[in-house]
Amino acid sequence: MIVIIDYGMGNVGSIENMLLRIGAPCVVTCDPHVIQSAHRLILPGVGAFDNAMLNLQRLGIVPLLDDLVKVKRVPVLGICLGMQVLTKSSEEGALPGLGWIDAATVRFRLEGGHEGLRVPHMGWNTIEIRRPDGLLEHLPIEPRFYFVHSYHVSCKDQGDVLAKTTYGICFDSVIRKGNVMGTQFHPEKSHKFGLALLKNFVEIKL
């Protein structure tokens, strides 16, 4: 069963609808007893980093998620802010992240030579695949995805980066370290491209 973590910070309904379109059984919940039985986890996210971490802590599910992801190696996909909380920290807040990826979340710095670009980075953009991976297989030609973010992830180990995107600067837009995966964009808003990526996540083998 795929569990979409409902912690008050994401487009859970849109993600659920996309998974149902590909015939993937899923549930939206914050119930620890249901989360415990997950064979896939999706951590969505829209909003501020500290609010996301506070909500996860208030629900008391961080130790459970740590056990599922770090010990039992359940595949997890973080989406947008959900990808950012996979990191160790964010310039947006003071709280530590989940730390499942050796990375930090930093603000866009578009200084000089980037006239016309504004933060947040909002709208459709392409990805440049840096290494082959099951998460990015069989995507439609010229894959493009929908972004909305003012901060981006910077991985310490570039071996954890599957794809990059350019918006003034080149930033890490798809990451993976073993069973931990993240997309800075919203696959649930990215039509056939997002549908293909979510199908890959559902079917991915570790």
Image (tube, rainbow, N blue to C red):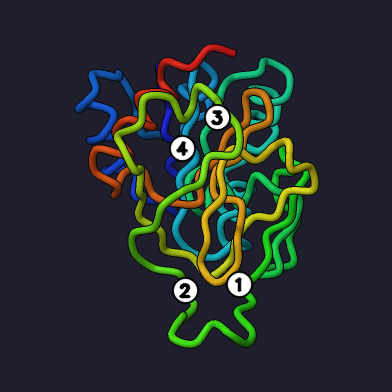
- Using the rendered image of the protein, determine whether residue 100 is visible from the camera's viewpoint: yes
**Circle nearer the N terminus (1, 3):** 3
- Few, some or many C-alpha atoms within 10 Å of disc 4 (few <14, some 14-19, many ≥20)? many
Residue 128 versus residue 82: which sits nearer the camera? 128
Mark 3, mark 4: which one is toward the viewer?
Answer: 3
Q: Residue at x 24, y 38 (%)?
A: 192
Label 3 belongs to which residue?
76
Look at 53% across and 40% down and name the residue there. Answer: 129
Compared with residue 61, is residue 172 higher up or lower down, i.e. above or below?
below
* CA gap, disc 1 and disc 2: 8 Å
Dot 1, how many residues are within 10 Å of its Cα: few (below 14), some (14-19), or many (20+)? Answer: some
Q: For the residues marked 3 and 4, what is the alpha-carbon distance in whole angstroms?
A: 10 Å
Circles 3 and 4: CB atoms closer than 8 Å? no
- Helix, strand or loop at label 2? It is loop
- Taking 145 as reference, is 177 above or below it? above
Q: Which residue is mark 4?
A: 5
Measuring 65% from the left and 28% from the top, which residue is drawn there? 64
Amino acid type of the residue that numbered disc 1 sits on in the rendered structure:
Phe
The Cα–Cα distance between marks 4 and 1, rounded to whole angstroms, is 27 Å
Mark 1 and mark 4 in contact (Cβ < 8 Å)?
no
Q: Secondary structure at mark 4?
A: strand
- Give coordinates of residue 199: x percent, y percent: 35, 24
Q: Amino acid at mark 3?
A: Val
Residue drawn 70% across and 30% down? 66
Is residue 38 placed above or below 21 in the rendered structure?
A: above
Q: Nearer the viewer, mark 2 or mark 3?
A: 2
Label 4 vs 1, first from the N-terminus: 4
Q: Looking at the rendering, which quadrant does residue 169 occupy?
A: bottom right
